[in-house]
Image (tube, grey):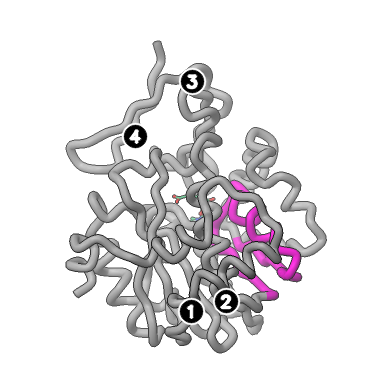
């Protein structure tokens, strides 16, 4: 029996039984492999790090999108950095109130292969008239654009390879510049049980630009190690405290069915366990 092993954390690995390798290639930017498994459906890894599986992707894509959009309440224009598989774009565009979604992805091959081999992830989002797909380095885009966005979602790889620049202080400062007043930045920020230094570093770097920054959480089984932290940065400190009744009203108005997000989970996601609070003292 063939297996695929992810060795992201020192001394620890997760191993998948492989039914079939669907595609494997070294793109211009990273090593890409897509394979089928009996337990997690179809899986994509980049540079030997699990990026997405069809079995548990919703827990990540729903919390990275509905939390900032429903907290903000009046978002119209969204920027996605990374997100090549299209899952974030799909969830953003389920909000009819969103009129523009710009997605800046560095690797065209990821978009093309995910559209072909994971059509349910983007679910037609790349063809939505509200989508503006730009193939570029996200750090360059936010440094140079004169556009402003209500929500910025950084669905990056880990701070290894092309994704490393998306965890820098200057990148967060550029994102701050690209937000409308009271806009919100959310970021993929790893699993603190294994990547605690990423939480401390992001907290310090984001704090240089945002009046209110911190983390909220989700749980994605194949981002192994338990709770996953999602970075949160805004100048409107009230956004993290929107009451559950308001969230319920906004969620109902959006008329979106979900498998992980609920207004109560939204509120609960901002409650952090002590070991994470200790990382951001
Ligand atoms: N959900 C996954 C996770 O949490 O690890 C990330 C999924 S998505 C596939 C990550 C995307 O970030 C990839 O498509 C990769 O090409 C893209 N990416 C990495 N560095 C980038 C950069 N500097 N600018 C834009 N996109 C980048």
Among the two numbered marks 4 and 1 on one chain, the one whose residue lies closer to the N terminus: 4
Determine crowd level at label 1: few under 14, some 14-19, many 20+ residues with C-alpha closer than 10 A.
many
Determine crowd level at label 2: few under 14, some 14-19, many 20+ residues with C-alpha closer than 10 A.
many
Residue 107 percent coordinates (x, y): 58, 51
User: What residue is pinned by disc 2?
Assistant: 72
Among the two numbered marks 2 and 1 on one chain, the one whose residue lies closer to the N terminus: 2
Can I make out residue 137 in this image? Answer: no
CA–CA distance in space, label 3 to label 2: 39 Å
Q: Marks 3 and 4: which is nearer the front?
A: 3
CA–CA distance in space, label 3 to label 4: 17 Å
Residue sitting nearer the eye, 15 or 95:
95
Q: Mark on residue 38?
A: 3
User: What residue is pinned by disc 1?
Assistant: 239
Residue 3 percent coordinates (x, y): 38, 20
Q: Secondary structure at mark 1?
A: helix
Among the two numbered marks 2 and 4 on one chain, the one whose residue lies closer to the N terminus: 4
Q: Is residue 279 above or below residue 57?
A: below
Residue contact between numbered discs 3 and 1, judged by CB atoms under 8 Å: no
Residue contact between numbered discs 2 and 4, judged by CB atoms under 8 Å: no
Among the two numbered marks 3 and 1 on one chain, the one whose residue lies closer to the N terminus: 3
User: What residue is pinned by disc 4?
Assistant: 6
Q: Is 277 one of the magenta-colored residues?
A: no
CA–CA distance in space, label 2 to label 4: 36 Å
Residue sitting nearer the eye, 109 or 69:
69
The part of the chain drawn in magenta is: 76-104
Q: Is 79 one of the magenta-colored residues?
A: yes
CA–CA distance in space, label 3 to label 1: 40 Å
Q: Secondary structure at mark 3?
A: loop
Q: Marks 3 and 1: which is nearer the front?
A: 1
The quadrant in which the N terminus is found is top left
């Amino acid at each position: 029996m063939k297996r695929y092993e992810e060795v992201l954390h020192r001394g620890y690995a997760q191993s998948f039984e492989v039914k079939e390798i669907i595609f494997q290639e070294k793109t211009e930017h990273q090593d890409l492999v897509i394979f089928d498994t009996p337990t997690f459906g179809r899986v994509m890894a980049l540079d030997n790090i699990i990026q997405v599986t069809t079995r548990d992707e919703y827990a990540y894509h729903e919390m990275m999108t509905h939390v900032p959009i429903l907290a903000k309440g009046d978002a119209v224009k969204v920027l996605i950095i990374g997100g090549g598989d299209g899952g974030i774009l799909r969830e953003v565009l389920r909000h009819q109130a969103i009129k523009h979604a710009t997605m800046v992805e560095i690797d065209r091959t990821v978009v093309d292969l995910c559209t072909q081999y994971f059509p349910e992830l983007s679910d037609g989002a790349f063809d939505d008239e509200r989508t503006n797909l730009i193939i570029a380095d996200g750090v360059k885009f936010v440094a140079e654009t004169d556009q402003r966005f209500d929500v910025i979602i950084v669905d990056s790889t880990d701070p290894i390879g092309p994704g490393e620049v998306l965890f820098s202080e200057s990148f967060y400062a550029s994102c701050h510049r690209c937000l409308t007043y009271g806009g919100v930045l959310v970021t993929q920020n790893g699993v603190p049980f294994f990547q605690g230094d990423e939480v401390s570093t992001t907290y310090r770097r984001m704090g240089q630009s945002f009046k209110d920054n911190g983390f909220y959480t989700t749980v994605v089984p194949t981002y192994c190690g338990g709770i996953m932290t999602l970075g949160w940065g805004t100048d409107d400190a009230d956004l993290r405290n929107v009451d559950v009744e308001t969230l319920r009203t906004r969620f109902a108005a959006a008329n979106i069915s979900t498998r992980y997000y609920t207004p109560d989970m939204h509120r609960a996601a901002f409650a952090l366990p002590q070991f994470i609070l200790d990382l951001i003292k």
